[in-house]
């Protein structure tokens, strides 16, 4: 789809050379990490200022052109996919850290700041930005906010929304709103900031964010523990939580570990082969704290919950143990996985996982299932790997049937069909499994207030 007149108008709204229409750019910027939808944007626009974002949005309203935000494009729900002739608004050039406040421990960022860039900035100041995940080296703060990104530290630090002190947003009408003004306490009616966090760009675009920082953790230490079954993981979690504050508690299956070890660049944590593994992290701030962790580990072994384990003794070993978990997504991507990111309350995890595992195994015994996730906060990642001999379209069609069964179980357990990846287009048709008709009606009404012409990332979250 081309429209030379619209593209010429768009070029007047940004700096020279900051509108791209070549095939490679359209393909690269028109998609995220999902493989379900073919990108087909009209053009890619790169604003460099808030005023340019406002100009693009106002022009899009006049011309009834749909807009799709683009950050690091690491999302897994197709929220950043432009498949229907939209203009992609990419924030790569709005990537500055603008201000740091030492007293309030806040950093003012443009939306294109990469997550690791903020983490490194905080570290240089002796502080800590705790929201972390495998794609931190390429994801952007604006996208993190748009999807309310979670990751591996949620059990201790919460989601992205817990770290957003204030926002500047351009609404679907082109208005600039400054939300919360970085206050800790603000009891003046609706907190509109929270509406834009997790809205996936459907209400407007984040153009500036004030992010809170925390004290840097002391001597982070990890244990990887092998368990005889899934039911043993929850008692292990409870045993450690009774004794210390954990910064992370992850799990992965033997199949997930085997895929990572087959790469050849990460050593096995220990010789014993186990069906499931837990990775937990804590601050060994004192020698007594480390001894308490070892004593708890020994208690878990005595109870039969743990078969073997290892605790990091250096920064390098800590990183190697984390690679066992963090390399899973990248490693299994070669098998064209069908991903589901679901959550239930923590106590329901074992029964919930068993039901899903049994259904998939019964109906598709030839599909390889890889489980991993942030089990300490109830978030599970179900990955179904495409058989080599099966056509991609046939595979995704079969997985769509799996979706219905999975989400029926999610609904049964009062869970969420998307714990941290958002709804986008991949989960849009299943929203009713987690949200009531009344809730969805309220969300649509809210969108109409901020985006009356429906130009902001249309077709995402709901139709």
Image (cartoon, helix red, strand yellow):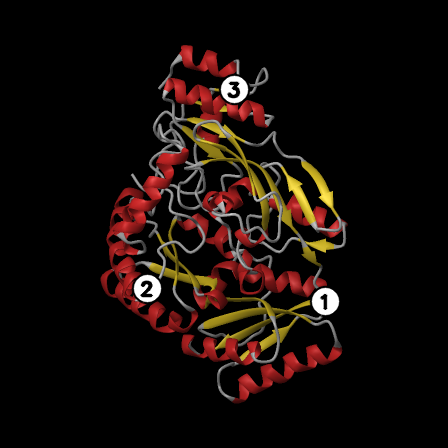
Viewer-proximal residue among 368 and 423: 423
Instruction: Look at the numbered discs 3 and 1 and tell me whether their residues touch, using CB distance below 8 Å.
Output: no
Q: Earlier in the sequence, mark 3 or mark 1?
A: 3
Look at 26% across and 65% down and name the residue there.
Answer: 359
**What is the tally of numbered marks visible in this picture?**
3
Position of residue 52 measured from the top left corner of the image (x, y, whole percent): 55, 23
Look at 54% across and 85% down and name the residue there.
Answer: 301
Q: In the figure, 437 relative to 345: above or below?
A: above
- Residue identifier under label 2: 414
Mark 1–mark 2 distance (CA, rounded to whole Å): 38 Å
Instruction: Look at the numbered discs 1 and 2 and tell me whether their residues touch, using CB distance below 8 Å.
Output: no
Instruction: Estimate how packed mark 1 is, as few (under 14), some (14 to 19) or many (20 or more) residues with alpha carbons within 10 Å.
Output: few
Residue 136 visible here: yes
Q: Earlier in the sequence, mark 1 or mark 2?
A: 1
> Outermost residue, bottom direction?
302
Instruction: Estimate how packed mark 3 is, as few (under 14), some (14 to 19) or many (20 or more) residues with alpha carbons within 10 Å.
Output: many
Viewer-proximal residue among 155 and 180: 180
In the picture, measured across the screen, residue 441 lies left or right of residue 329, that is: left
Q: In the figure, 432 relative to 242: above or below?
A: above
Mark 3–mark 2 distance (CA, rounded to whole Å): 45 Å
Name the disc covering residue 219, or none.
1
Position of residue 33 measured from the top left corner of the image (x, y, whole percent): 45, 42
Secondary structure of the residue carrying numbered label 1: loop
Q: In the figure, 315 relative to 194: above or below?
A: below
In the picture, measured across the screen, residue 106 lies left or right of residue 336, that is: right
Position of residue 458 measured from the top left corner of the image (x, y, whole percent): 36, 34
Quarter of the figure with the C terminus: top left
Instruction: Look at the numbered discs 3 and 2 and tell me whether their residues touch, using CB distance below 8 Å.
Output: no
- Residue identifier under label 3: 19
Secondary structure of the residue carrying numbered label 2: loop
Look at 43% across and 70% down and name the residue there.
Answer: 346
């Amino acid at each position: 789809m081309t429209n030379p007149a619209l593209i010429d108008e768009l070029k007047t709204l940004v700096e020279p050379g900051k509108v791209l229409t070549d095939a490679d750019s359209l393909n690269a910027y028109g998609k995220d990490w999902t493989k379900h939808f073919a990108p087909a944007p009209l053009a890619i626009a790169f604003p460099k200022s808030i005023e340019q974002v406002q100009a693009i949005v106002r022009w899009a309203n006049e011309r009834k052109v749909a807009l799709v935000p683009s950050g690091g494009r690491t999302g897994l729900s197709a929220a950043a996919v432009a498949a229907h002739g939209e203009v992609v608004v990419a924030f790569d050039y709005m990537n500055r850290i603008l201000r740091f406040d030492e007293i309030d421990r806040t950093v003012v960022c443009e939306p294109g700041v990469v997550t690791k860039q903020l983490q490194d900035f905080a570290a240089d100041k002796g502080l800590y930005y705790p929201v972390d995940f495998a794609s931190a080296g390429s994801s952007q703060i604006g996208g993190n906010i748009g999807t309310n990104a979670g990751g591996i530290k949620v059990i201790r630090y919460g989601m992205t929304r817990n770290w957003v002190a204030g926002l500047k947003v351009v609404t679907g009408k082109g208005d600039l709103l400054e939300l919360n003004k970085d206050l800790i306490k603000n009891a003046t009616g609706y907190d509109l900031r929270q509406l834009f966090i997790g809205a996936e760009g459907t209400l407007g675009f984040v153009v500036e964010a004030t992010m809170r920082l925390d004290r840097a953790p002391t001597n982070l230490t990890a244990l990887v523990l092998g368990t005889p079954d899934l039911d043993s993981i929850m008692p292990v979690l409870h045993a450690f939580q009774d004794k210390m504050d954990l910064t992370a508690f992850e799990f992965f299956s033997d199949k997930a570990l085997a895929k990572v070890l087959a790469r050849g660049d990460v050593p096995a944590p220990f010789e014993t082969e186990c069906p499931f593994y837990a990775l937990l992290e804590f601050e060994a701030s004192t020698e007594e704290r480390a001894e308490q962790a070892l004593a708890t580990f020994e208690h878990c072994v005595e109870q039969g919950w743990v078969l073997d384990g290892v605790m990091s003794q250096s920064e390098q070993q800590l990183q190697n143990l984390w690679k066992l978990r963090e390399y899973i997504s990248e490693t299994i991507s070669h098998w064209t996985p069908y991903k589901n990111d679901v959550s239930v309350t923590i106590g329901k995890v074992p029964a919930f996982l068993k039901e899903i595992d049994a259904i998939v195994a019964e109906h598709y015994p030839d599909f390889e299932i890889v489980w991993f996730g942030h089990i300490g906060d109830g978030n599970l990642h179900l990955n179904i790997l495409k058989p080599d001999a099966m056509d991609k379209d046939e595979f995704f069609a079969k997985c769509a049937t799996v979706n219905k069964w999975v989400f029926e179980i999610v609904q049964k357990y009062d869970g969420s069909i998307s714990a941290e990846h958002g709804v986008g287009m991949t989960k849009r048709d299943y929203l009713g499994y987690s949200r009531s008709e009344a809730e969805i009606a309220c969300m649509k009404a809210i969108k109409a207030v901020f985006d009356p012409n429906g130009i902001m990332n249309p077709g995402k979250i709901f139709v």
